[in-house]
Amino acid sequence: MRISKKSCCLFIGLLITAYTYAQQQGNTPVSLKTLLNSVNRNAPTLLTDSAAIAVRQAQAAETRSSWLPNLKLNYQADYGTNNNVAGPYFGFGIIPSNSRGVRPESNTTTVSANVGVAALDWEIYNFGAYGAQNKVANSDIQVQQNQFADSKYQLQAYAIGNYLLLTELENFLTIQARNIKRNQEIRRSVQSLAKSGVRAGVDTSIAEAELSKARLNYIELNNQVKQVQLQLSAVSGLPYQTIVPDTAAETNLINTATGLDPLVIDTTNHPLINYYKSVYQNSLQRETLVKKSYNPKILLEGAVWGRGSSVDANDHFNSLSSGWGFDRNNYLVGIGVSYNLFDIRRRQLKLRTQRANTDYSRKKLDEQKQLLAVNANRSGVELQTARERLVEIPNQLKAASDGYRQKLSLYKNGLTDIIELNAALNILYRAETDYVQAKYAYSNALFQQAVTGNQVNTVLNLLK
């Protein structure tokens, strides 16, 4: 059983060593700029949103063609009877022939006839309705483009947040690897002292338990690293194993940013605000469209047609073959005006609905402006707190490191016990992790302020 434990510990140690070596030697660190460029090219949501823009552009092109006239060509050749009576009627889809006068007697002789018609129907002017339709279509494109820009911006923020988290976890792994080495050093000292009879054998078990706990923590951190790598891989298209953060860039960023003036907050041109502005403008354009959709319509109508029949002008039923060809030709051109008086009420009702939508869009825009202003203030406070924490943390780290070295020296000389030594080691470990958390908190607060204040590119330019 003890051989199994030793083999397991050896295997875990080799795994950790191999992983650390692979991280340091096998994969070149991926810079944040490189990652964001890959996200912009390969993110599935951005590809979908860009396709949606193409749809809106196609719809706008379709709308711009709505002014085209209708020019219909019709021709028919018929066999049937021409046995009519006088009197008006409404058509029911199929209108029976009503040509020729009424005969004193019923005559169901079959006749032949043909007719060809070319008819033009063109709404040449509708008092601005065409222009309003085009403006709404262009506004739809603008909304979709701004939604794409906002999605891209939010996805960048998501990638930045996960990249910073990955950097923190990598730093934790480095600390945990050092913690494992310290525990191994303590175990060697304990084993040496126990063999010489200076220390009790129970110290060996305690040291072994602490070492195993450190290894388990490393395995758990390694799993968290892979989970974050997988999340970044899903939006960037990069193999997750290759997404290794540049931990040195974080230190350079902190050193550079702490000496600069505070970021200038620009919420006016924030992608999120631009999106809601375009939604509001789109709703206003739709109000105009509703107003103009119910205006009168001026129509140009025109038609030419020819007709032939086997019944002549004297009401003689000739051979069916005489019905082919056009005996009579006509044309008709006219200007018409169409207006539905009940559209006044329909316009009022639809305009009331659209104005309610506009009011909602305006309030949504105001809400987002307020939330963005609140988040900007909050990120500023968090950044200041993170900066103050970074100033104080080195004092804690130095004191904890000195304390551990002193306790280790005392333990090796038999002047303290393993409990106090482990306590000093835990204090050092906590100080190191606190330092990593402080750096992460500052970097994260800096980028959060940049994201809120529309200054991401400014901060990215600080990265070397």
Image (tube, rainbow, N blue to C red):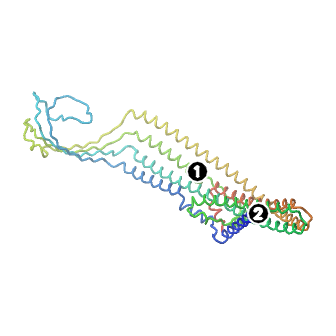
Question: What residue is rendered at 77% in x and 67% in y?
Answer: 181
Determine if residue 255 is in view. no
Tell me residue 393's x, y (percent). Answer: 80, 60
Tell me residue 175's x, y (percent). Answer: 75, 64
Pair 2/1: label in front: 2
Q: For the view shown, which residue lies furthest in the right direction? A: 415
Question: In what element is the residue under mark 1?
Answer: helix
Position of the C terminus, as image quadrant, is bottom right
2 or 1: tag closer to the N-terminus: 2
Tell me residue 77's x, y (percent). Answer: 17, 44
Question: In what element is the residue under mark 2?
Answer: helix
Amino acid bearing label 1: Ile
Return the residue nearer the eye: 417 or 307: 417
Residue 127, quarter of picture: top left
Q: For the view shown, which residue lies furthest in the front direction? A: 1
Tell me residue 447's x, y (percent). Answer: 66, 58
In this rendering, position of residue 302 left or right of residue 62: left
Return the residue nearer the eye: 285 or 90: 90
Position of the N terminus, as image quadrant, is bottom right
Where is mark 1, residue-wise? 273
Determine if residue 134 is in view. yes
Categorize mark 2 by other alpha carbons within 10 Å: few (<14), some (14-19), many (20+). few
In this rendering, position of residue 415 left or right of residue 395: right
Where is mark 2, residue-wise? 2
Q: For the view shown, which residue lies furthest in the bottom direction? A: 25
Distance (Cα) linking label 2 and label 1: 65 Å
In this rendering, position of residue 307 left or right of residue 29: left
Residue 47 to residue 412: above or below: above
Amino acid bearing label 2: Arg
Residue 170, quarter of picture: bottom right
In this rendering, position of residue 45 left or right of residue 176: left
